[in-house]
């Protein structure tokens, strides 16, 4: 038994050694393949770099030629845009007062002009000029957005104020009637106060617009309440007229000369001439009645 165990242990050790050898060989092969692949990739990159380097001078020359044409044209457009933006700033001073900082359009224009001056040199640094001009163009784009937004917001606020004033005037025409309740007048007063606050706002165009819109809504509510009050009053007057007419008709009904019981007319009431009632004057027989042969008859 001992001998058998020893043989099995020796066989296991031999097998482990064979497995380690196989693993080592496999690892070395993998490492060699990986190194070969890295060398191939590096060679490809080197070849690409050489090709790019060979083509670079020609590409650079073509780029500089394009910039020599493009930069002066862009300078002209930048100067025109700067003048246009500055004109907007000058013609809309009220809108500009709501900006925390008015864009320095004149500075951007000077940068563009400086690029144009440098482009006239014997050997202009086109790449540097292109970069400088791109910065000025980006600044003008931002300035245009800021100025346009300020003008648009200011115009919107003025339209809102005008609309609120018109709504208040229309509500005033409705509220002056005597049938209008105090609630409608209070709404109109609130609208006037809201408009005054909006007109006195100096910090935010959005606040002006919001305040004016609130004033307009309140004025419209006042006008609607006044119209409803007038309709309600007219309905009450109409109901009163109908009630009075009905009362008059009822008071002029029974007790007159005409049809119906109790009057001096035709029909079978007492003391009427004609048909057969007691104490009547006419023909016919019967005691105390008019007619043939009765006493006290005529």
Image (tube, helix red, strand yellow):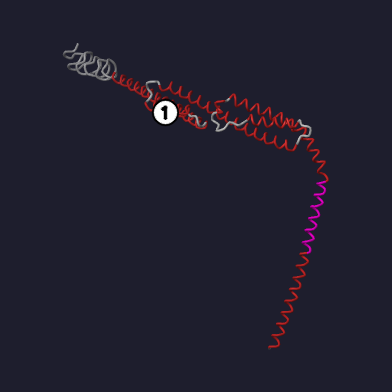
Residue highlighted by disc 1: 190
Q: Quadrant of residue 154?
A: top right
User: Dot 1: few (<14), some (14–19), or many (≥20) neighbours within 10 Å?
Assistant: some
Residue situated in front as seen by the camera: 93 or 223: 93
Which residue is rendered at x = 32% and y = 20% of the image? Answer: 244
Give how far across and how far down residue 262 sits, in percent.
Answer: 24, 19
Give how far across and how far down residue 66 sits, in percent.
Answer: 78, 35
Q: Left or right? Give the position of 86 relative to 207.
A: right
Report helix, strand or loop for mark 1.
Answer: helix
Give how far across and how far down residue 295 sits, in percent.
Answer: 16, 14
Quadrant that contains the N terminus? bottom right
Q: Main secondary structure of the magenta part?
A: helix
Give how far across and how far down residue 216 sits, in percent.
Answer: 47, 28
Which residue is rendered at x = 42% and y = 28% of the image? Answer: 190
- The relative height of residue 200 versus residue 63 in the rendered view (above or below) is above
Residue situated in front as seen by the camera: 135 or 277: 135
Q: Left or right? Give the position of 254 relative to 227.
A: left
Residue situated in front as seen by the camera: 31 or 10: 31
- The relative height of residue 54 versus residue 242 in the rendered view (above or below) is below
Q: What stretch is highlighted in magenta?
A: 32-53
Q: Left or right? Give the position of 164 relative to 92.
A: left
- 11 drawn magenta: no
Farthest residue, direction top = 298
Q: Left or right? Give the position of 104 relative to 187.
A: right
Farthest residue, direction left = 295
Which residue is rendered at x = 80% and y = 52% of the image? Answer: 46
Quadrant that contains the C terminus? top left
- The relative height of residue 69 versus residue 295 in the rendered view (above or below) is below
Residue situated in front as seen by the camera: 28 or 76: 76
């Amino acid at each position: 038994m001992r001998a058998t165990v020893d043989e099995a242990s020796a066989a296991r050790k031999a097998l482990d050694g064979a497995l380690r050898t196989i693993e080592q060989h496999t690892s070395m092969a993998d490492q060699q393949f990986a190194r070969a692949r890295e060398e191939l990739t590096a060679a490809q990159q080197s070849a690409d770099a050489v090709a790019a380097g060979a083509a670079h001078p020609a590409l650079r020359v073509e780029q500089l030629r394009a910039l020599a044409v493009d930069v002066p044209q862009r300078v002209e457009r930048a100067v025109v845009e700067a003048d246009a933006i500055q004109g907007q700033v000058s013609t809309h001073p009220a809108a500009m007062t709501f900006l925390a900082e008015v864009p320095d359009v004149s500075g951007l224009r000077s940068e563009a002009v400086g690029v144009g001056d440098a482009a006239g040199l014997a050997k202009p640094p086109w790449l540097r000029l292109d970069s400088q001009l791109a910065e000025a163009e980006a600044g003008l784009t931002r300035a245009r957005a800021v100025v346009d937004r300020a003008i648009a917001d200011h115009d919107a606020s003025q339209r809102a104020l005008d609309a609120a004033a018109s709504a208040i005037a229309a509500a005033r025409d409705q509220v002056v009637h005597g049938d209008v309740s105090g609630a409608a007048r209070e709404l109109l007063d609130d609208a006037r106060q809201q408009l005054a606050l909006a007109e006195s706002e100096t910090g935010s165009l959005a606040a002006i617009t919001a305040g004016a819109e609130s004033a307009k809504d309140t004025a419209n509510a006042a006008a609607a309440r006044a119209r409803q009050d007038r309709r309600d009053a007219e309905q009450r007057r109409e109901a009163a007229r109908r009630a009075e007419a009905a009362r008059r008709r009822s008071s002029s009904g029974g007790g007159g000369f005409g049809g119906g019981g109790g009057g001096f007319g035709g029909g079978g009431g007492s003391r009427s001439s004609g048909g057969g009632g007691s104490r009547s004057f006419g023909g016919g027989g019967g005691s105390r009645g008019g007619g043939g042969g009765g006493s006290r008859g005529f």
